[in-house]
Amino acid sequence: MACDPREAALALHRFGFGPRSGSIEAIAADSRGALLAELERPNAGQIANADLTSSSAANRAVFEYNAARAANGKRERLRREAAAQVAMQNAGAEAAMEAKPDAPAPAANQPDAVPLPRQLFRKEAKAHFDAAINCEIGLVERLVWFWSNHFCVNADATVMAGGYEREAIRPHVLGRFSDMLLAVEGHPAMLLYLNNEQSIGPGSVAGINRDRGLNENLAREILELHTLGVRTVYTQTDVTNFAKVLTGWTILPTASDPDHGGEFVFLGRAHEPGAQTVVGNTYTDGGVGQGRAVLADLARHPATAKHVATKLARHFIADDPPPALVDRLTQRFLDTDGDLKEVTAALVAAPESWGPEQAKIKRPGEWIVAALRATGEPGEIVRILQAQALLGEPLWRPPAPKGFSDDNAAWVDGLGQRLEIANAFAHREGLGHEPEAVMDAALGPLASAETRRAVTRAESRPQALTLLLMAPEFQRR
């Protein structure tokens, strides 16, 4: 096969996280084959890091940490109040005023220490970004990011967001959609985010005794966002019935279960009894199996195949993806029973995926990782997180259950802020890099004549690096 550096550079930007030094040359002989080979790599998409705890263990640790903080604060307040009383008895009101009993308690035993929830978040975030920065091409990591956004949770609602990505997304990113769907919908992070741990069947034992009822959030988002798509084949009655099916899907209470708190549990006494009809199919009451059966059918529904195919094509190829590509991916999804590796391989093999136009703007996280890969800089996790948040894509904090937008319009307005971040990065790191060498490594034949002139004529290395990172062909994929 003829060597094609241009297609190789395009492949690395469009399907990966951008080139590293030598990447373009490494795959130029067969860039499409290199992408497909990454799908076959053993343990692709997995993170082996003994320093990362399970999501439920993190949940329990943070609960204990917060309880200890509250106790320490109360203990300190009582100590100060006692000291104030002694001062009042021994020296009168003036001494009591000096004791300042209402002064705020220290935030922790070590006031300058990073709080445990932030420590856990940063560890998970570092593992998340290191996997993208250090990968050979990045197709599988891009898929992890795509599915993590499709099935998003919010770190403001649960400390389990990082563990959720490792436990529910990564193991299934090249497996069957039905397996991923079951893993994410039963994960404690999703149950907490969409309030299903509070949902009780009105006709269940718990519902009758506690006079509490249904929460439809999880059922609605599964139908609308995760599977069938907005305004497709389901009705409000389907949402309500599916919510009844999912009652009893909850988590063990952390306060009363120090060993397993925060883990999934099916609570039969909270489950709405009886058969339910969802999207034309009737499901007998089989406890937790009733919900699993609905999810299995939703995973195989033609509307789900079309929804997933459209989102994949929009993410990788164009805001308005070619209908022929969407149809091809939809059919591959149906033919393989939702085999996501096969659907991805069909995306890579499709001629519509290789148009020369770089039609998609990189999302902030993708652009940050591309800059680090291009320069060979490892990145510092706090700076990465701050930059991504400033650019409107705070890690694991989507604005709504729909996740972050994959449309260019959502990111155009933030390009000015990217200039500020690129400039700061270039002045911090740029003196150690030869800009033209970075340009050749990062863009190769994609670099336009205008970009080459701007970089070579820049007044300083930092200015040249800034111009490179802001070049249209670097901003897009």
Image: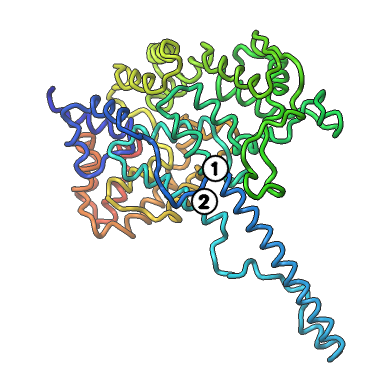
Residue 161 vs 232, above or below: the answer is below
Question: Disc 1 and disc 2: Cα gap in Å?
Answer: 8 Å
Residue 161 is tagged as 1
Identify residue type, mark 2: Phe
Q: Nearer the viewer, residue 476 or 159?
A: 159
Q: Residue furthest left?
A: 2
Residue 313 vs 393, above or below: the answer is above
Q: Which residue is mark 2?
A: 121
Identify residue type, mark 1: Ala
414 relative to 352 in the view: left or right: right
Q: Position of residue 314 (x, y in %)?
A: 43, 24
Q: Position of residue 211 (x, y in %)?
A: 86, 32
* Residue shown at 57% from the left, 54% from the top: 117
* Residue shown at 55% from the left, 69% from the top: 112
Is the residue marked by circle 1 packed among few (<14), some (14-19), or many (20+) residues within 10 Å?
A: many
Say what secondary structure mark 2 lies in: helix
5 relative to 157 in the view: left or right: left
Q: Nearer the viewer, residue 62 or 237?
A: 62
Residue 291 vs 11, above or below: the answer is above
381 relative to 400 in the view: left or right: left
Q: Position of residue 385 (x, y in %)?
A: 47, 51
Does residue 323 appear anywhere in the picture? Answer: no
- Say which quadrant the C terminus sits in: top left
Q: Are marks 1 and 2 in contact (CB under 8 Å)?
A: yes
Q: Earlier in the sequence, mark 1 or mark 2?
A: 2
Q: Position of residue 223 (x, y in %)?
A: 61, 21
* Residue shown at 32% from the left, 37% from the top: 472
